Amino acid sequence: MKKTLLLITALLALGSLPAFAQSAEYERIAAKANALIEKEEILATAEEAAFFSGAQMRSKIVARTRRFAEEHPGGKDELNALADYVALENYRLQNAIPLGQGVFFLNYAVRVDWSGNKVPKSADALLQPKYNYYLILTYSTAEKSILEFTPSINAYTPLNFHKATLGKKTVLYAVENGSSFGWATEKILLSVFDPATFSGLAQEIILYSQSFYSAGVEDIEFCKDFEFDGNALHFWGTDFDFDEGKYIRGYDKVYRF
């Protein structure tokens, strides 16, 4: 998975995960996922956080976003709209995670204020009203520059990143949501990324529920628990083979980094 994955992944949920009629195990894992969805990691000093939210950093973000827009003409209007929002100070720091050697992973929510004086003319280029936008980057305090950068989009729910150290490897992870309410499908994934490149390292569905509203078609529901343990990420529970149309009981998979 390339870092552009974050640009095209829509995260669909209503603040917290929707309430289907589910087992106690399913509900327990949903609560675990919700805690990650809602938790904002600001692991910076007050002085560092103030700089990351200040005018100097804002100028760097606007310039990098406009440069990214020139490099990706297919999304140029949307990206310039995001730059306009940041220039109007209609954004906020949502995650600040130190990666070592003076480098921080930073996640900014954009278009957080819908009042008239905070909405640029370019706002029409963005999907509305349910979508939220983020600018994600790494920043070197030693070099005073942005290293890696990518925009991200989600619907309804916060996009929050967290850090795990697995042996000598540091990774970032987030709960992504590919639910489709129109199809009565809940699809929640745990995704793991390389903080240096934003490339994907692992991804597993941890919650899935689909209702077909037909007596002749059986609804689908399965869930997997997960744990970071030592130098590995462990998933276990039940999966579903959509090609074969059957459950995989006793699913057990370990990712080592």
Image (cartoon, rainbow, N blue to C red):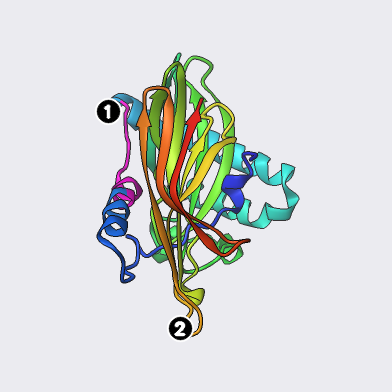
Given residues 147 and 196, the one toward you in this image is 196
Q: Residue 119 shows which numbered tag?
A: none
Alpha carbon separation for disc pair 2 and 1? 52 Å
Q: Position of residue 109 (x, y in %)?
A: 43, 48
Q: Residue 213 shows which numbered tag?
A: 2
Q: Is residue 91 left or right of residue 39?
A: right
Residue at image x 49%, y 37%?
A: 192
Give neighbour class at mark 1: few <14, some 14-19, many 20+ (Cα, 10 Å): few
To which residue does mark 1 refer?
A: 46
Secondary structure at badge 1 equals helix
Based on the picture, tell me whether residue 37 belongs to the magenta stretch: yes
Q: Is residue 119 visible?
A: yes
Residue at image x 41%, y 59%?
A: 222
86 to 147, vertically: above or below: below
The three-letter amino acid code for the residue at tag 2 is: Tyr
Give neighbour class at mark 2: few <14, some 14-19, many 20+ (Cα, 10 Å): few
* Count of marks placed on residues: 2
Q: Position of residue 95 (x, y in %)?
A: 38, 38
Residue at image x 58%, y 41%?
A: 150
169 to 115, vertically: above or below: above
Q: Which residues are magenta?
A: 33-44
The three-letter amino acid code for the residue at tag 1 is: Ala
**Quarter of the picture holding the N terminus:** top right
Based on the picture, tell me whether residue 19 belongs to the magenta stretch: no
Secondary structure at badge 2 equals loop
Q: Is residue 54 visible?
A: no
Tell me which numbered mark, 2 or 1, is placed earlier along the sequence: 1
Eye-nearest disc, 2 or 1: 2
